[in-house]
Image: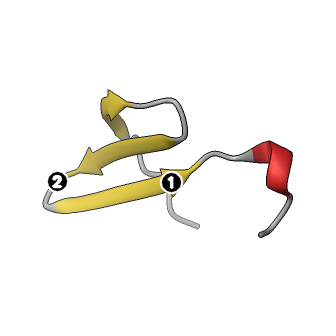
Amino acid sequence: MSEPIAWTPIKEFQEIIFSQHGGIAKISINRPQVHNA
Protein backbone atom coordinates (compact mmCIF):
# COMPACT_ATOMS: atom_id res chain seq x y z
CA MET A 1 0.00 0.00 0.00
CA SER A 2 1.36 3.43 -0.87
CA GLU A 3 1.88 6.23 1.61
CA PRO A 4 -0.52 9.21 1.65
CA ILE A 5 0.52 12.24 -0.41
CA ALA A 6 1.91 15.14 1.61
CA TRP A 7 -0.06 18.05 0.12
CA THR A 8 1.53 21.49 0.57
CA PRO A 9 -0.94 24.31 1.26
CA ILE A 10 -0.31 27.20 -1.15
CA LYS A 11 -3.02 29.68 -0.33
CA GLU A 12 -6.15 29.39 1.77
CA PHE A 13 -9.22 31.51 1.23
CA GLN A 14 -12.34 31.51 3.38
CA GLU A 15 -14.04 28.73 1.38
CA ILE A 16 -11.33 27.50 -1.03
CA ILE A 17 -8.17 25.56 -0.13
CA PHE A 18 -5.46 25.36 -2.81
CA SER A 19 -2.69 22.76 -2.32
CA GLN A 20 -0.07 21.13 -4.51
CA HIS A 21 2.24 18.12 -4.60
CA GLY A 22 4.79 17.83 -7.38
CA GLY A 23 3.08 18.90 -10.60
CA ILE A 24 -0.45 18.26 -9.35
CA ALA A 25 -2.72 20.91 -7.81
CA LYS A 26 -5.72 20.18 -5.58
CA ILE A 27 -8.54 22.67 -5.09
CA SER A 28 -10.99 21.95 -2.24
CA ILE A 29 -14.21 23.82 -1.61
CA ASN A 30 -14.77 24.07 2.14
CA ARG A 31 -18.42 25.00 2.75
CA PRO A 32 -19.67 22.78 5.60
CA GLN A 33 -22.79 24.91 6.05
CA VAL A 34 -24.24 23.73 2.68
CA HIS A 35 -23.69 19.93 3.07
CA ASN A 36 -22.96 18.48 -0.39
CA ALA A 37 -24.64 21.28 -2.32
Between residue 35 and residue 1, name the one nearer to us.
35
Q: Could you say where residue 33 lies in the image, as x and y percent from the top left?
A: 83, 44
> Does 27 sit above or below residue 17?
below
User: Residue 2, labelled with which disc?
Assistant: none
> Does 20 sit above or below residue 1?
above
Residue 32, quarter of the rendered image: top right
Q: Residues within 10 Å of mark 1 (few under 14, many from 20)?
A: few
Quarter the C terminus occupies: bottom right
User: Quick one: SS at disc 1?
Assistant: strand
Q: Could you say where residue 1 lies in the image, as x and y percent from the top left?
A: 59, 67
Which residue is depicted at the point 51% across and 30% down?
14
Is residue 34 shown left or right of residue 31? Answer: right
User: Quick one: SS at disc 2?
Assistant: loop
Q: Amino acid at mark 1?
A: Ser
Q: Could you say where residue 18 lies in the image, as x and y percent from the top left?
A: 35, 44
**Real-space CA distance between mark 1 and mark 2, rounded to the nearest whole angstrom:** 17 Å
Residue picked out by circle 2: 22
> Does 12 sit above or below residue 16?
above
* Front of the two marks 1 and 2: 1
Residue extending furthest left?
Answer: 23
Residue picked out by circle 1: 28
Which residue is depicted at the point 55% across and 40% down?
15
Is residue 23 shown left or right of residue 7? Answer: left
Image colouring: secondary structure
Is residue 4 visible in the rendered image? The answer is no
Q: Could you say where residue 4 lies in the image, as x and y percent from the top left?
A: 52, 51
* Mark closer to the chain start, 1 or 2: 2
Is residue 22 visible in the rendered image? The answer is yes
Q: Amino acid at mark 2?
A: Gly
Which residue is depicted at the point 40% across and 56% down?
27
Which residue is depicted at the point 63% across and 45% down?
30
Between residue 9 and residue 3, name the one nearer to us.
9
